[in-house]
Image (spheres, rainbow, N blue to C red):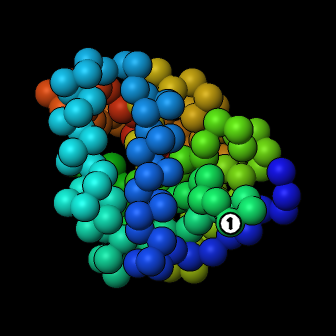
Amino acid sequence: MTAIAYADAVAADGPELDAMARESWIATFGEASSAADLALYMAEAYGPGGRLLRDLGDPAYRFRLARDEGRVMGYAKIGPASLPDDPAPANSVQLYQLYVLPPWQGAGVAAALMQWFLDAARSAAAPAAVLTVWENNSRALAFYRRHGFREVGEYTFMTGNQADRDLVLRLDL
């Protein structure tokens, strides 16, 4: 592992980012869904018509990439908070995704991406930072709690036709 390089994503990063995000999502959550639900979710979230690439082109969202030897192996996506029954104050910033491929987990990449998120939220004078996390993702829950986030609600995350319970976490800034 060499020095990790961090940079904001641009449109040209889309295909590599999309492939990395898909790989990370499957590694983390793939076994928790049926093949049919996984296929439905993948078609909605990734690929040429997927939400990730649409959001990459939307100025309301920002992406930060982490690269090792030129390969995208981690990223964070942030934007305006938009949760149903949103427990966050107006003008809060939401962390939509923070994914790091398994070989780089525990190497400080997630912490650097989290710091970027919090710095961006503070620079925007956001009153709070919010995120959702799957209730069974104990590693991510512990990470977010170490950064001061606390549970303020729950959110139903749809993986295809499967409803999963996510926890809504908030950090007042």
Mark 1 neighbour class, 10 Å CA radius: few under 14, some 14 to 19, many 20 or more = few
Image: 115 above or below 166: below
Residue 60 percent coordinates (x, y): 33, 76
At a point 30% along the width and 77% down the height, the residue shown is: 58
Residue 145 appears in the rendering: no
Taking 140 as reference, is 16 left or right? left
Q: Residue at x 41, y 57 (%)?
A: 18
Residue at (68%, 66%) from the top-left corner?
Answer: 70
Q: Residue 93 occupies which quadrant of the picture?
A: bottom left
**Residue 119 appears at what percent x and percent y?**
63, 71
Query: Which x, y percent locates residue 44?
Result: 20, 48
Q: Is residue 102 visible?
A: yes
Q: Is residue 153 left or right of residue 25?
A: left
Q: Which element type, helix, strand or loop, lies under badge 1?
A: loop
Q: Residue furthest right?
A: 2
Residue type beneath disc 1: Gly
Residue with the mark numbered 1: 70
Is residue 140 rendered to the left or right of residue 17? right
The residue nearer to you, when weighing 133 against 32, is: 32
